[in-house]
Image: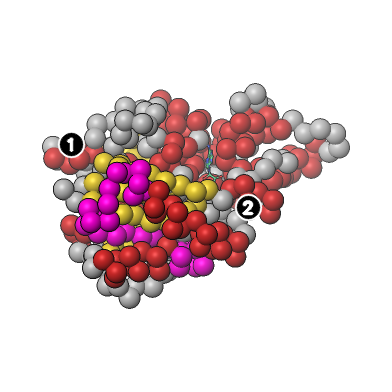
Amino acid sequence: MSLILAIETSCDETAAAIIEDGHIIHSNVVASQIDIHRAYGGVFPEIASRQHVFDIVPVIQAAIHEAGSSWDDLDALAVTRGPGLAGSLLVGANTAKAIAWGRGLPIVAVNHLEGHLYSNWLDEGDKIVPSAITRPSPPELDAAGEAFPLLVLIVSGGHTELIVMAGHGEYRRLGATLDDAAGEAFDKVARLIGLDYPGGPAIQAAAEGGNPLAFAFPRGLTNYAIQPEHRYNFSFSGLKTAVLRQVRELGEGPLPVADLAASFQAAVVDVLISKTAHAAQLLNVKRICVCGGVAANKALRESVAARLPVPASIPPFFLCTDNASMIGAAAHYRLSTGGPSALDFDVEPNLALEMRE
Ligand code: KG4
Ligand code: ZN
């Protein structure tokens, strides 16, 4: 058995978790700063890093306490190296390095996107509400040789990517967004129609009472006959502009916020699902994993269950948005394929997922 203490501070959540063998969650502690940043309409980087400094030690202590572990039980440290905000990343990386050095433990520097991807490898444990979709445990799939090739859709605040995974740590990028990420589009459109930060949950809530057919918003880059080279790429800036134009056209008076939210959300979900389904069919993959903050979206989850052509998995809500459990899961597989990182690694705010086939 290997027990990893994982730390994640790439954006505005201070998170720590204890993970066994890459999939069993012993504890998962997240201190969210959302209430602090809401006043600014988005993440305020300097305030985020200062808040991480306040929260990091109590969050780590809580993770160890909740797991019923002691420092002596730990086999390795894991921490997010990038992408993310430099000041935020530094707090987690320096704390993890100090613990690793002090206790003589190996450390694994993890790519945040690889973390999101491995959120699909985590067991949900007892305390946890099951996800909308039943999924066999990925370690079981691995053992049966059934996990790969796997198609991964990462949809977060900063990224929207379609990736084929041939094995652990082996990635090939099919496509990505040419402009805004899906989560970024949710956040920007929310502001346009007068909703709070973060926009994803606010749009989802507003859309509940709305008609998704009220406005015919564009589905960017989905005409594969005209633009086959963009079949795996995404573009959400045209959609954002279409919402803006619609808002201006509606003029004075109260906006039909519910209908705007529902129609926008339907357009995003439609694009994400149709491109993922298209790729799965063309590439003959065995499974699909959807992950990242936007994977928490209820409408997307329903479409994943209803419209994808091969078995798909999506983590439970609390593992979609930023957390440290996913960093611990990714680190477990990194350790077994590439070994630990050197203690002098640096944070990398623009780190991309390393492609290896
Ligand atoms: O993965 P994440 O927590 O952080 C990044 O790595 O970016 O994703 C945050 C993004 C935000 O843009 C947020 O609006 C979006 O995920 N999000 C959602 C929902 N919950 C969070 N988008 C749509 N529906 C949701 N329920
Ligand atoms: Zn994230």
Task: Decide if residue 241 is on the left or right side of residue 120.
Answer: right
Q: CA distance from mark 1 to mark 2?
A: 40 Å
Residue 189 to residue 348: above or below: above
Residue 217 to residue 130: above or below: below
Magenta span covers which residues? 63-91
Q: Quadrant of residue 218?
A: top right
Q: Secondary structure at mark 1?
A: helix
Do we see residue 245 in this rendering?
yes
Dot label at residue 113: none
Dot label at residue 37: 2
Q: Residues within 10 Å of mark 1 (few under 14, many from 20)?
A: few
Image coordinates for residue 234, horizontal then vertical, percent: 49, 49
Q: Which is closer to the viewer, label 1 or label 2? A: 2
User: What residue did someone put label 1 on?
Assistant: 140
Q: Quadrant of the C terminus?
A: bottom left
Picture residue at 64% right of the left edge, 34% below the top:
261
Picture residue at 40% right of the left edge, 41% below the top:
319
Q: Quadrant of residue 6?
A: bottom left
Q: Secondary structure at mark 2?
A: helix
